[in-house]
Amino acid sequence: MTKIEICAPAGNLPSVKAAVDNGADAIYMGFSGDTNLRNFPALNLTDDEVYKAIQYAHGKNKRVFITVNAYPQEKELPLAYDVVDKAYSYGADAVIASDIAVLSYARTKYPGMRLHLSVQASASNVRSIEFFRKHFGIKRVVLPRVLTLDEIRELRDQTDIEIEIFALGLLCINSEGQCFLSSYITSESINTYGACSHPKFINFEEDADNEGEGTLKILSNNVLLNKYSPMEEVAYPTPCKGKYYNKATDKLNNSIQDPESLNVIEILPEIIQTGINSIKIEGRQRSRSYVEKVVSTFREAVDNYYSNSHSVIDRSKRESLQTLFEGLSPSYGCYKGK
């Protein structure tokens, strides 16, 4: 029996080794630069590190997928093409892309290269998926986090293309990152520059005015995203999860999206029974320790399912997983209902 694949994130070489050594079947990563959607300073891998990562993973029979999933404008297009060239020459097992220029380039120049359709393409119906297969030969689609398990099961019945879904990480309700909130605030779009909350725009300030000493203010390009009291948990700062004044309710709240984190560990059997091929763990911007813990926990849960038809893991491990969230509470997202 072929087990469902665990596809793990890696933003540096230590995380690659942590993923491989703790049970990932595949790792996804990006080259440093504006070509992928985790374009943070000191994150992603140099050419030499990508080569070493692929060698290390292949040495343990694991696969490596390279993300090239930004939407390049004309001046960035050569950079994206260069990453495709390097991914092929270094022996990557697949390129994950969404822009049709990048897909077309890879398909034309390297007909044998395996292509995965990035979640950024937002392909959520069989006609869209088959369009990308017909024109670009994609082998896998990463589904956007907007479908229920029933809808995913229906898709599975309608196409034999490999399906990958997110199992852990932040939730994005704005067309999987194709929003323009960050562009509105900072003039730099995630779609082009690869980060919806780029550190160069983020400031953390102590606010000692009316709300008491120790209140933390988080700003993006001088736009206030959130205020937190000293004892309040702090979520990952993105424009969509900021607190804004709602004229309808006359309250300051998370008007666009609550700061939740996706976690399917409790419903993993239902996920596997949809017939999908891969579960993706988000977090290329996270540490080696994060990768080690989440991969080993999901490895145990998946192996338990195939051994015992359930995916029960220790309570302490479930609680440990929750401490790693970037949001403030766990969620099944749309998987159990919209």
Image (cartoon, rainbow, N blue to C red):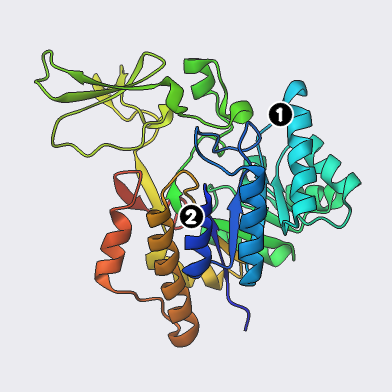
Side (left or right) of 156 relative to 199: right
- Is residue 5 positioned above or below 209 on the image? below
Q: Position of residue 31 (x, y in %)?
A: 63, 42
Q: Position of residue 147 (x, y in %)?
A: 55, 52
Residue at horizontal 62%, vertical 46%? 119
The image quarter containing residue 248 is: top left
Near-viewer residue (175 or 153) = 175
Near-viewer residue (285 or 276) = 285
Residue at horizontal 56%, vertical 57%? 165
- Is residue 3 positioned above or below 67 on the image? below
Q: Residues within 10 Å of mark 1 (few under 14, many from 20)?
A: many
Residue at the disc numbered 2 = 14
The answer to whether residue 194 is visible is: yes
- Is residue 331 positioned above or below 225 on the image? below
Q: Position of residue 237 (x, y in %)?
A: 37, 31
Side (left or right) of 222 relative to 151: left
Q: Give the position of the N terminus as an image quadrant.
A: bottom right
Residue at horizontal 61%, vertical 49%? 49
Foreground mark, 2 or 1, reads 2
Side (left or right) of 44 relative to 315: right
